[in-house]
Amino acid sequence: MMLKKIFINSFEALVENKLRSMLTMLGMIIGVAAVILLVSVGTGAKRYITAEFESLGTNIIIIQPGKTDKKSSMGPPISSSKGKITLSDVDAIMRSSQLLSAVSGVMYGAGTVKYDISASNIYIMGSNDQLQKVFNINIIEGNYISKEDDDAGRRVVVIGWNVKENLFGKDSPIGKLVKINESEHRVIGVIKPTGDKLGFNVDEMIFIPNKSALRLFNTDKLFGIRAAAKSRASLDDAVADITEILKERHNGEEDFTIITQVTMMDSMNTILNMLTYALGAIAFISMLVGGIGIMNIMLVSVTERTREIGIRRAVGARQSDILKQFIIEAVVISVSGGLIGILISLFITYALFFAFPGFDMRPPFWIIPPSFLLSFFTGLIFGVWPARKAARIQTIDALRYE
């Protein structure tokens, strides 16, 4: 029996049992689609987080008081009792390092801002005029904090978009007085709607000069320093500069932690890659279930077609011909299910991408060929046992089978 004829007989057998063939494919369809979808979720998360980091630039440097893990996340600054960073440290870095494009001390706290009868619970960020450059903060109305505002510790405030909407509605807030924890500040600017950026929602924040923030929170310690290197190439040298400057000011003790955005991105990518592989491994279990389903159905098919096998053997079909026919049937079912699963997963991921373009979970191209090959080898491996069982049936026994 020629191989072409074997293929034709295999397809005819599948077409004659359409419902059974489709139900057998279903396990493989779900398995392949699950592999691609779960890998796409992991890849989408990686793309989203990478884009968030890159939107701030890749040359950001974070200095925190206290010696901690350098791979910590870029969330709100956390004060530490193990070290102390002051405004004089910020001034020293600004004076001594030639590799930084912007440097700002930061204060952080929670409070209430009031205007007339309206009030909002907000996050308060103390900074100088250069924080705007570090984090690419865009002003939609008015101005950001100036150097003169910071040097004089003026009671001025730049407010996030949601704060402006809650307190002033459609009116312009520029020049109006608000109470921040009962301390009056004049509004000088409104930040363009931004969303999450600094590890928290910028739209729910207000920004005041550092000296004003230190006075408001009754402390002389900053929560940290944020800086930007002039280029990605000079990032490591800038970190070395900052380390040397601060150690000299802190009596040779390295009681601070310097984190770069590149370090955080590398750490995050490692975690997300492991997540993607874990999701792919979980989805692989679905492929095994699909393969077992193919094997079970093929075993049933062998039993139902025992007499047909006997007739084929009687007219000259060899054991190898029967073996090939049933293996080809299993592979065709598996590969067909795999192709349908690939098409379904592509449709779902691209539909979600067009509906939610901010989270790009389109599958990477590299996952498609392995998914197809996985479906092929699943059919091949799980089709061997039923095919061998069919090939070993004796001709006389098959012809007598009722």
Image (cartoon, rainbow, N blue to C red):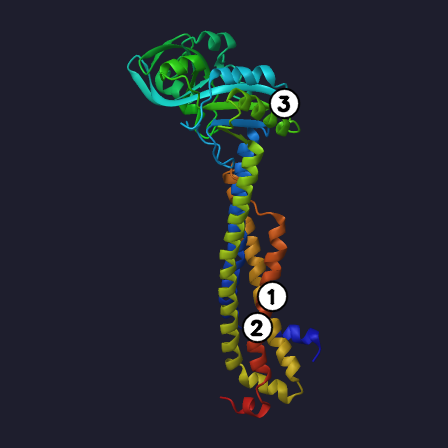
Q: Nearer the viewer, residue 305 or 239?
A: 239
Task: Inspect the image, locate mark 2, and give the three-letter code of the amino acid beneath it.
Answer: Gly
The quarter holding residue 236 reads top right
Q: Nearer the viewer, residue 123 or 65?
A: 65
The earlier-in-sequence mark between 3 and 2 is 3
Judged from the image, the secondary structure of the residue bearing numbered disc 3 is loop
Q: Is residue 283 above or below residue 224?
A: below
Q: Which residue is mark 1?
A: 377
Mark 2–mark 1 Cα distance, whole angstroms, equals 9 Å
Label 3: how many Cα within 10 Å (few below 14, some 14–19, many 20+): some
Which x, y percent locates residue 385?
Answer: 56, 76
Judged from the image, the secondary structure of the residue bearing numbered disc 1 is helix
Mark 1–mark 3 Cα distance, whole angstroms, equals 53 Å
Mark 3 touching mark 2, by CB under 8 A? no
x 50%, y 55%: residue: 34
The quarter holding residue 46 reads top right
x 44%, y 15%: residue: 210
x 55%, y 34%: residue: 51
- 12 relative to 200 in the view: left or right: right
Which x, y percent locates residue 187?
Answer: 41, 11
Q: Which mark is residue 383?
A: 2
The quarter holding residue 327 reads bottom right
The earlier-in-sequence mark between 2 and 1 is 1
